Image (spheres, helix red, strand yellow):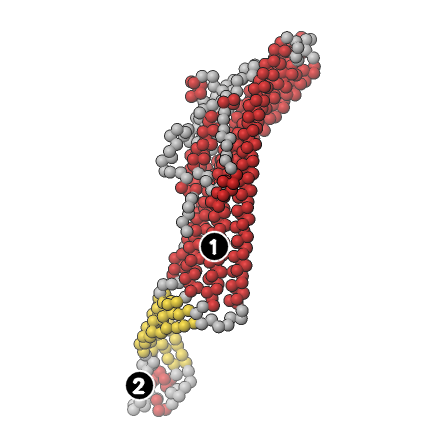
Amino acid sequence: MSLTKSLLGWLPLGFTLAALPSAVMAQAQIAEPSATLPEDNYPSSEAEAKAAGALPSLPALFALALQHDAQLSSQRYDMEATAQQIPKARAGLLPQVDASIGYVYQDSENYYTGNPAYDPSNERIDPEYEARYLGQTEDTTWQVQLTQPLFSLERWRQLDKAYAQRDAAELQVAVAERDLALQLSEAYLDAFLASRKLGLLASKREALELQVKQAQRAFDLGIGDRINLYESQARFDQALAEQIRAENELDNALSDLERLTGQLPRFDTSTLGDLSEFEVPSDWGEPQTWLERTQQNVEVLLAKQQQQIAQEDTDVRRAGHYPELNLNLSYVDRGSNDPFRESENASASVELNVPIYRGGYTSANVRQGELTALSSAAAYTNTLNLAQQEVRTRLRSLNGDVRQLEALKRSIESSRLFLQAAEKGEQLGLRDLVDVLDARADLYDLRIQFVEVVRQYILDSLSLEAAVGDLDTRDLVESMVKLEALAGQG
């Protein structure tokens, strides 16, 4: 069986990613927030946009992970070790040649021992009988033997089983590569989300800090009340706590990326583009079409291959009922202190072994294999059901993500208009500072929610492709395009 699709083939050596940012991540400064709400924290000029650091390249990080991840390396070594089952099984069908040498000292009592008729001290007796008369012989034997199986159904089926095991090991590597891609993508998206949250929360905190100063000044002048001051301080402290949590989330995500790739990428900027212009595909086709493609899920393919191994193993066990036919060729050279024991022998024989009765071992062995095959068939069905359930779940989540993004766009626009109205109302004395704080906090929170939904959308799309066995470098490239558009770098 040849592996139809391995994630190892995702990345060509040249990386046709010229349009994407390289793996080298530049550092950029976060724009200082003003007293009024910034327009999505986005560079206001093309020069500022170029100065902003580009996002780390997700495909390039995956290339590093393929070489660095210890778990994947372990899986590859296991695959190479399993592949050695093929030459081992093939060796059972080839001639086996053995050479041996032996030395035997023997002290015996027999017809010749102590018999005066063979006493070598008698001049009429041939001295060659001395070893027999004394009963002490020393033999040295040299032997070369060749054994060639002429018929062994069990050994032929062992070879078929070895090929099936090799293919399963390759699929296990493909599963490990897919899991690595998903783990890396999730950590990358977590780092992206945390870096954007940090930027928004930093702007939010500085704006709230200014509001605290304004509330304190108004209170000191007697034109403000203590409630507004406490409200401003509470919102400021809450924003600070959220910023610290986002910093921890970013550190954890970067730590995961470093563990997977061996390098520490940098997310130095926290810019966001115009969220109202951000678009994602919304038509994912019919669910049945996706469900039919789950047969190519690498875990499903692996379960199917393991079912094949179980069937091959059962066939090997059944072959224990069949006879074996072997050809034996041997040459023996015996040297001895007894010249009558010296010899050179060459022999050829054909040996037929017929298993007749082994106490019920073969029948029990076959039954065990049949039950294992049934278990593998059930495991395959379960894996396929799980893959199909994953497809349904991800499709529902994607459709929900699209609807959430559209709703958040409208909510962000409404919140922006409400903030402007609240600020003007405060200036005219129709609104108080609490209304402005609420409007500003809501707008920042909505933007954070928008980035969170985009993160979930991309993760759902990658997981959907993985569920049907189509996850490859192009999906990582498309994810980078979406993130760059979200960050205003597209």
Crowding at mark 2 (Cα within 10 Å: few <14, some 14-19, many 20+): some
Secondary structure category for the residue under label 2: helix
- Reading the image, the residue beneath label 2 is 127
Which type of secondary structure does the marked residue at label 1 adopt?
A: helix
- Rendered position, 321 above or below 466: below
Left or right placement of residue 434 versus residue 473 in this view: right
The foreground one among 168 and 1 is 1
The residue type indicated by label 2 comes to Pro
The label on residue 202 is: none
Q: Residue at x 57, y 22 (%)?
A: 410
Please name the residue shown 49% across and 43% down the image: 292
Could you say where residue 454 lies in the image, as x and y percent from the top left? 53, 29
Residue 354 on image: x %, y %: 45, 72
Camera-nearest residue between 141 and 249:
249
* CA neighbours of label 1 inside 10 A, class few (<14), some (14 to 19), many (20+): some
Q: Is residue 341 visible?
A: yes
Q: Position of residue 282 (x, y in %)?
A: 51, 30
- Give the answer, above or below, for where 332 lies relative to 383: below
Work out which quarter of the rendered image holds the C terminus and state it: top left
Relative image position of residue 266 (x, y in whole percent): 47, 29
Query: Is residue 452 shown left or right of residue 346?
Result: right
Which residue occupies the foreground of this view, 468 or 415?
468
Label 2, label 1: how many angstroms apart (C-alpha)? 71 Å
Residue 191 in sight in this render: no
Name which residue type carries label 1. Gln
> Image point 55% across, 52% down: which residue?
378
The answer to whether residue 48 is above or below residue 340 is above
Sequence-wise, the earlier of marks 2 and 1 is 2
Q: Residue at x 55, y 27 (%)?
A: 405
Residue under label 1 = 308
